[in-house]
Image (spheres, rainbow, N blue to C red):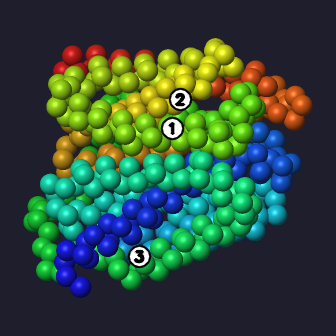
């Protein structure tokens, strides 16, 4: 096989694997009504089950990079995809919520070993100049997975049932594990990496890691990731779907269509904001970051205080801007991290910061479920007041992230 088709085959396989990693992240929103009925689950317990994906995902991120460097990206991706297969298969068999939580934790652990090793494979196959494009492509395909996890998946579950749907996903995951093991190569034939000065690097790296953990910038960014990332995935991946059905009376497919708009915002609006970040606002990234978060605060303010009075058009606008500004915010945050971090420690910084948003999701999903259970159901559904309490917590968290972003602006001015 020639070099040209080999690298594109690798790209296709990696994107397919990441597609399902993202699919699992948000699919609980569509499954929520079925799981609550099947397991007689409360909102708190369902939130805890859904968050089981994010704990192993977040906590294993620093380790994934180490394993990738030691054993190679192909082995990590293959093993992780196989773990995801086991998790999906066991989820389809789950007799109770505890079993389902364990299976979802396996899915999260499997998904954790995809993004970082995928980028490491794509770098030698496509070159440094195309590295950013490959990163953007992975994120776009991931959000296509989010789209597939909304309306198309809601339709599919209606046709075959939620258990059969997971057996189908498990079979595809197993196929991707086999394809990863067979076709992915860590580097092209004859590839020679750029020489790096490594003399005395180990001791300085350890010392640099300690110094990094002591810097105010690191903890500011970690807090920003935590407070910003938790509310978004809590809505897109868990409560947004039942919120639209309970409060607005939408059918399952109608609710799925609206949730799908969030991913469309990421895919369509994200590249536009990314271009503006690099070109028009290259020197004003920190103020622009605050503006992005401000838009999110406005979106959540509307959900919390306007609620049932919102029409479908305005809801669609809120969801699109929610996805668009999420992509823009992530682009800005990583750009700021790159500017502040020494090049030789950028990977370490990213690996340490990346768990923060997933820990935020793992915290917010059960907390919001608890707040909803405190209000309780009425006529078999949660009233708007229950969602108002849960989303009020999300609004407060995003308001905190907005305040944190102001500290970044002040810090740059002082510098």
Using the numbered discs, state the Cα–Cα distance from disc 2 to disc 3 in whole angstroms. Answer: 38 Å
For residue 27, side relative to residue 297 (left or right):
right
Residue 347 appears at what percent x and percent y?
29, 51
- The residue drawn where x is 87% and y is 28% is 378
Q: Secondary structure at mark 2?
A: helix
Mark 2 or mark 3, earlier in chain? 3
- CA gap, disc 2 and disc 1: 7 Å
Q: Which residue is mark 2?
A: 316
| Element at label 1 | helix
Residue that protrudes farthest toward the bottom in the picture: 1
The secondary structure type at the circle numbered 3 is helix
- Confirm whether residue 117 shows in the render: no
CB atoms at circles 2 and 1 under 8 Å apart? yes
Instruction: Write down the residue under mark 3.
Output: 180
Q: Residues within 10 Å of mark 1 (few under 14, many from 20)?
A: many
- The first of marks 2 and 1 along the sequence is 1
Residue 86, image x and y in percent? 62, 71
Residue 138's x, y, as percent?
36, 54
- The tag earlier along the polypeptide, 3 or 1, is 3
- Compared to residue 348, the image places residue 87 above or below, namely below
Q: Which residue is mark 1?
A: 261
The quarter holding residue 381 reads top right
Above/below status of 5 relative to 120: below
Spatial CA distance of label 3 from label 1 is 31 Å
């Amino acid at each position: 096989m020639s070099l040209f088709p080999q690298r594109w085959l690798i790209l296709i396989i990696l994107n397919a694997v990441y597609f399902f990693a993202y699919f699992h992240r948000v699919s609980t929103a569509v499954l929520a009504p079925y799981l609550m009925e099947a397991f007689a689950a409360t909102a708190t317990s369902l939130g805890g089950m859904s968050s089981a994906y994010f704990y192993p995902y977040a906590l294993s991120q620093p380790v994934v990079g180490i394993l990738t460097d030691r054993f190679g990206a192909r082995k990590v991706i293959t093993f992780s995809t196989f773990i995801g297969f086991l998790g999906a298969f066991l989820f389809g068999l789950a007799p109770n919520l505890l079993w389902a939580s364990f299976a979802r934790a396996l899915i999260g652990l499997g998904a954790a070993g995809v993004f970082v090793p995928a980028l490491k494979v794509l770098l030698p196959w496509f070159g440094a100049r195309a590295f950013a494009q490959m990163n953007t492509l992975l994120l776009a395909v991931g959000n296509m997975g989010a789209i597939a996890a909304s309306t198309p998946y809601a339709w599919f579950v209606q046709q075959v049932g939620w258990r059969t749907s997971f057996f189908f996903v498990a079979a595809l995951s197993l196929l991707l594990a086999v394809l990863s093991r067979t076709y992915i190569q860590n580097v092209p034939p004859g590839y020679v990496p750029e020489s790096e000065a490594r003399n005395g690097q180990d001791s300085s790296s350890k010392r640099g890691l300690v110094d990094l953990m002591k810097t105010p910038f690191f903890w500011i960014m970690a807090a920003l990731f935590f407070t910003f990332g938790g509310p978004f995935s809590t809505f897109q991946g868990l409560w947004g779907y039942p919120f639209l059905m309970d409060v607005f009376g939408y059918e399952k497919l109608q609710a799925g269509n609206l949730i799908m708009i969030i991913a469309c915002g990421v895919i369509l609006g994200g590249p536009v904001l990314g271009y503006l970040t690099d070109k028009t606002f290259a020197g004003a990234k920190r103020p622009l970051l605050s503006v992005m978060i401000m838009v999110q605060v406005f979106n959540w303010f509307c959900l919390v205080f306007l609620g049932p009075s919102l029409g479908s058009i305005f809801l669609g606008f809120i969801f699109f801007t929610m996805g668009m500004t999420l992509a823009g915010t992530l682009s800005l945050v990583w750009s700021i991290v790159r500017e502040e971090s020494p090049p030789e420690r950028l990977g370490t910084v990213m690996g340490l910061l990346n768990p923060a948003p997933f820990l935020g999701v793992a915290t917010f999903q059960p907390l919001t479920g608890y707040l909803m259970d405190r209000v309780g159901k009425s006529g078999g559904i949660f009233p708007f007041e229950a969602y108002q309490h849960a989303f009020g917590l999300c609004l407060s968290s995003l308001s905190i992230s907005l305040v944190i972003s102001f500290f970044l602006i002040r810090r740059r001015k002082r510098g």
